[in-house]
Amino acid sequence: MSQHSHAHDDDLAHHHDIHSELPSDPALRVKALESLLTEKGLVDPAAIDAWIEIYESKIGPRNGAKVVAKAWVDPAYKQRLRSDATKAIGELDFLGRQGQHIVAVENTPEVHNLVVCTLCSCYPLSILGLPPAWYKSAPYRSRAVLDPRGVLKEFGTDLPEHVKIRVWDSTAEVRYLVVPERPAGTEHLSEEQLAALVTRDSMIGVAKVKAP
Amino acid sequence: MNGVHDMGGMHGHGPIAPEADEPLWHAPWEARIFGITRAMTFPKGFNIDRFRHLRELLPPDLYLARAYYDHWYAVCIAALLDGGLATADEIRHGRAAPGGARRNDAVRADQVWQSQKSQGIFTRELETPPLFAIGQRVRARNINPAGHTRLPRYVRGKVGVVHLHHGGHVFADTNAHMQGEVPQHLYTVAFSMRELWGPEASARDEACLDLWESYLEPA
C-alpha cells in the first residue's frame, strides 16, 4: 500500500459528517435505520431477531468451557487441540464466524497467555460469544501489550516474576483460545462439572480457574 | 492508517474496570444494531476488512466518545451511503424516498444459522512457498500507509521471531479497499517486550502478532 492519501477514503470519511445532524440518542438512530432498511427490503426484521437469538442462546463461553474441560480430561483430545485447534474444536461443532481459524494456547506453571485485539475488537466469537465491554475498551486495548502484568493485577491475577507472559494480539483472522490450568483438587470432578468452573475471563487469559 | 484505533502501547485511557455480571447487551438498541449488521444487505463486495476500515475512519473524537455498538451504527450508514443503497436524507428521516424500488433479496431468518456456520473462512491456497521459516528472525517493516493496515505502529521496525506459519490468508490491506483478496502467507511473530518497549521492559515476556508476509523482511 502506498503512503499517498486515498481520495476515495476521504470521501468515505465524509460519510461520517452526517453524525452531527443526527439525534445523539443511539436508540432513536438505530430504530430509524431498522425502519428504513426494512422499508427498502435491505433487511428482514425476523433475520435480525434470529441473529440476536443465536448469540443469546447458542453461542457463548459455555462452548469454550466444554473445549477446555474436554482437553483437561482427555489427553488425546488435548494433543489434537495443541496440534490443530481448528479441527479439534470442529469435532465439537463450535466453528463459525469469527472462529473458523483457531489456535489454542495453553497456560502452564511456566507460561501464561493473554489475548487482546489492539486494533479493533477481534475475539473468538464462535467459542466465547460476544466480548465483554472491557475487552473492547481503550484501557485494555492500549495497555495489554505494554504492561500485561499490570493489566492482570487489575483483574486480581498476580503472576510470579518467573512466569513468562505471552500476549496474543489478534491482528488477522486467527482467533486465540487460552486453555487455563486445571486447578488442583479437581481430580474427582466430571467433565461437565469441570466445564462449569471454566470462566470466560480464564479463556481470555485475565484470570485463573479456581477450584470449587 | 495511523489512526486513534491503533491503541497498542498508549497511556492515559484509565483503569480497565470490568463490570460484575455484565449483561450481554447494555440497552436493547445494542442488540438491534448487532443483528442489523449481521443481517442487512451491504453493498456488493463489502467485507469485514472494509467494515474495520470504515470504523477506523470515524473522526478520533467520535471514535473515543461513542459506545462500541454505536461504531457499528456508524459503519452501517457509511457503507449504505458509500454503496448508494441509501441517501443521507433517508437515514435522517428513517423513511425511504418515494418511488424507490424495494429489494427482495435480504437474508431470511432460516438462513442465519447456515451463515453463522459457513462464513468467515479466510484461508486460501497459495502456490508460492513461504519466504520465512519458523524460528527465523524477521523485522516488521516501517510502513505508514494512509489506507487500512493490520500492522500496528508499536511493532514497526522491530525484530521478532517467526513462531507459527498459518498458510495463505486473505490480505486485509487490499481487501479493505475492495482491491481483491490477494492472499499472502500469514505468520505469528513473537517480539520480546524488551525489543518493543526498551530496557525497562520484561526480558521474559513476549507479544505475538499475526503478520502477513509483505509486512516482514529478513533480519
Image (cartoon, coloured by chain):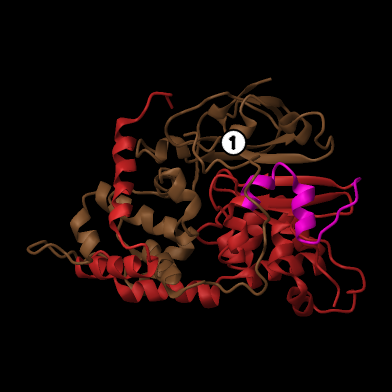
Chain colours: A red, B brown
Q: Is mark 1 on a helix, strand or loop?
A: strand
Does any portion of residue B4 appear in the rendered image? Answer: yes
Say if A193 sits above or below A127 in the image: below
Q: Residue furthest left?
A: B99
Q: Where is residue B79 in the image (x, y as percent from the top left)?
A: 31, 51
Q: Does the magenta stretch include residue B118?
A: no
Residue B219, by quadrant, is: top right
Residue placed under numbered mark 1 in the picture: B211
Q: In this view, does A105 lie to the left or right of A170?
A: right
User: In percent of the image, x 45 and y 47: which residue is there?
Assistant: B61
Say if A153 sits above or below A12 in the image: below
User: In percent of the image, x 37 and y 54: which residue is there?
Assistant: B74
Q: How crowded is mark 1: few (under 14 residues within 10 Å), some or many (20 or more)?
A: many
Q: Residue furthest top?
A: B219
Say if A160 sits above or below A202 in the image: above
Q: Which amino acid does label 1 sit on?
A: Leu
Magenta highlight range: A139-162
Residue A81, by quadrant, is: bottom right
Q: Is residue A161 magenta?
A: yes
Does any portion of residue B121 appear in the rendered image? Answer: no
Label 1: chain?
B
Q: Where is residue A127 in the image (x, y as percent from the top left)?
A: 61, 64
User: In percent of the image, x 24 and y 64: which residue is there?
Assistant: B105
Q: Where is residue B60 in the image (x, y as percent from the top left)?
A: 46, 44
The one of A129 and B21 positioned closer to us in this rendering:
B21
Q: Is residue A62 left or right of residue B38?
A: right
The one of A211 and A144 positioned closer to us in this rendering:
A144
Q: Where is residue A54 in the image (x, y as percent from the top left)?
A: 48, 73
User: In percent of the image, x 25 and y 64: which residue is there?
Assistant: A42
